[in-house]
Image (cartoon, helix red, strand yellow):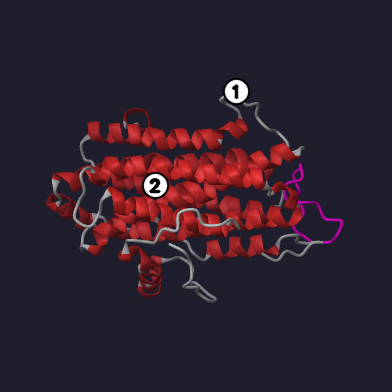
């Protein structure tokens, strides 16, 4: 990412709370904010009525998968939103970046509302809904994913015997912040949610749960932008403080991604059981390793697994989502999209 900065400019992770937008130090972050504004959608535009009939057609194994999936959705974006407020907004010292983060927080709130509506529709029984909202406590595979998040992200703000960091004064502080940011982008938004989206598009490839797929299209688009912004922040820090990106940081990132793949694979075993037609634990393992390789390469490190995407319906996702975006009636999005569209994103 190219940034416009003077030699006397502060670095992105320097302590403080920069307020001045002019002269603009990081105009690319401001453009990401503007792009996000053009991508506005509301939960009320998602029609879940046809999904109710589809749910009745599912096998017991498929119904179990959907129940676990929506239980994860119920808490996943709340973890993301908390980290945005408690860590990223606090320590990324750029008013342009904070504009984008404030917009991202709004989008996470829309996602939480979508998943709330999803649970209310899919789980009409109050006891089932209550159990789904308490999934971190009562579903082992989801609790393990939450434990992973708290290990790599919450420790930055305290916990597990670690003192909270109020200012990024030292190299060690900044490295811990980078691990938080990379976990947030590469593992949670870039792996956990991408794994969840694969289940949704597996159903869609079979002509099922179109309402869920429609809402997920828009969440997918948002999450892809969130991840790209976070990686731009990492790129900027690498340019300004290359000494932070040493072999030890690389080792920690590889360890983090390995743990993320294993946590998501435990979730896959829970969802898939002995296997479903076109979806099983081994295929999901290959897919998760493929996605992990993409994240490592984007971060400037070698691929670790050499895996390939086994799901053809995910390879087509970018084109399908963008086609839906331009073909929907004008009211489907509040602001028209302008500019060019890229078809080379990794999924």
Task: Tell me if mark 1 has few (under 14), some (14-19) or many (20+) residues whose alpha carbon lies within 10 angstroms of its own.
Answer: few
Numbered circles on residues, count: 2
The residue where tag 2 is placed is 113
Residue 161 - label: 1
Tell me if 169 is positioned left or right of 44 in this view. Answer: right
The residue depicted at 71 percent of the width and 52 percent of the height is 94
Foreground: disc 2 or disc 1: 1
Nearest to N terminus: mark 2 or mark 1: 2
Give SS at disc 2. helix
Give SS at disc 1. loop
The residue depicted at 69 percent of the width and 57 percent of the height is 236
The image quadrant that residue 328 belongs to is bottom left
Question: Which residue is most to the right?
Answer: 8
Assess whether mark 1 and mark 2 are in contact (beta carbons under 8 angstroms): no
Question: Which residue is most to the top?
Answer: 161
The stretch in magenta equals 6-22
Residue 152 - label: none
Tell me if 147 is positioned left or right of 43 in this view. Answer: right
Query: 119 and 183: which one is in front?
Result: 183
The residue depicted at 38 percent of the width and 44 percent of the height is 264
**Percent x, y for residue 112?**
41, 45
- Whether 327 is drawn above or below 66: the answer is below
Q: Is residue 323 visible?
A: yes
The residue depicted at 70 percent of the width and 33 percent of the height is 166
Q: Quadrant of the C terminus?
A: bottom left
**Percent x, y for residue 186?**
51, 50
Task: Tell me if mark 2 has few (under 14), some (14-19) or many (20+) residues whose alpha carbon lies within 10 angstroms of its own.
Answer: some
Secondary structure character of the magenta stretch overall: loop
């Amino acid at each position: 990412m190219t940034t416009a900065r003077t030699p006397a400019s502060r670095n992105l992770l320097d302590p403080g709370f920069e307020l001045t937008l002019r002269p603009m130090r990081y105009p690319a972050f401001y453009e990401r904010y503007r792009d996000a504004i053009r991508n506005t959608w509301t939960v009320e535009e998602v029609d879940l009525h046809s999904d109710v009939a589809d749910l009745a057609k599912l096998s017991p194994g498929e119904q179990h998968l959907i129940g676990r999936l929506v239980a994860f959705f119920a808490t996943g974006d709340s973890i993301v939103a908390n980290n945005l407020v408690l860590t990223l907004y606090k320590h990324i010292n750029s008013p342009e970046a904070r504009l984008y983060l404030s917009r991202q927080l709004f989008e996470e709130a829309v996602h939480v509302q979508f998943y709330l509506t999803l649970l209310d529709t899919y789980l009409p029984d109050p006891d089932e809904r209550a159990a789904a909202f308490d999934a971190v406590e009562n579903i082992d595979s989801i609790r393990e994913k939450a434990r992973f998040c708290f290990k790599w992200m919450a420790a930055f703000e305290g916990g597990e015997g670690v003192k909270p960091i109020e200012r990024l004064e030292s190299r060690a502080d900044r490295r811990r912040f980078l691990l938080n940011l990379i976990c947030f982008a590469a593992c949670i938004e870039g792996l956990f949610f991408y794994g969840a989206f694969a289940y949704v598009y597996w159903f869609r490839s079979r002509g099922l749960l179109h309402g869920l797929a429609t809402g997920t299209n828009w969440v997918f688009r948002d999450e892809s932008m969130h991840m790209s912004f976070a990686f731009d922040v990492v790129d900027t820090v690498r340019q300004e403080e290359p000494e932070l990106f040493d072999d030890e940081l690389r080792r920690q990132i590889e360890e983090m991604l390995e743990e993320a793949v294993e946590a998501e694979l435990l979730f896959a075993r829970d969802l898939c059981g002995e296997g479903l037609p076109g979806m099983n634990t081994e295929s999901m393992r290959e897919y998760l390793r493929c996605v992990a390789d993409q994240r490592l390469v984007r971060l400037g490190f070698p691929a670790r697994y050499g895996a390939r995407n086994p799901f053809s319906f995910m390879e087509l996702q970018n084109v399908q989502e963008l086609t839906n975006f331009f073909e929907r009636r004008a009211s489907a999005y509040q602001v028209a999209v302008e500019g060019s569209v890229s078809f080379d994103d990794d999924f």
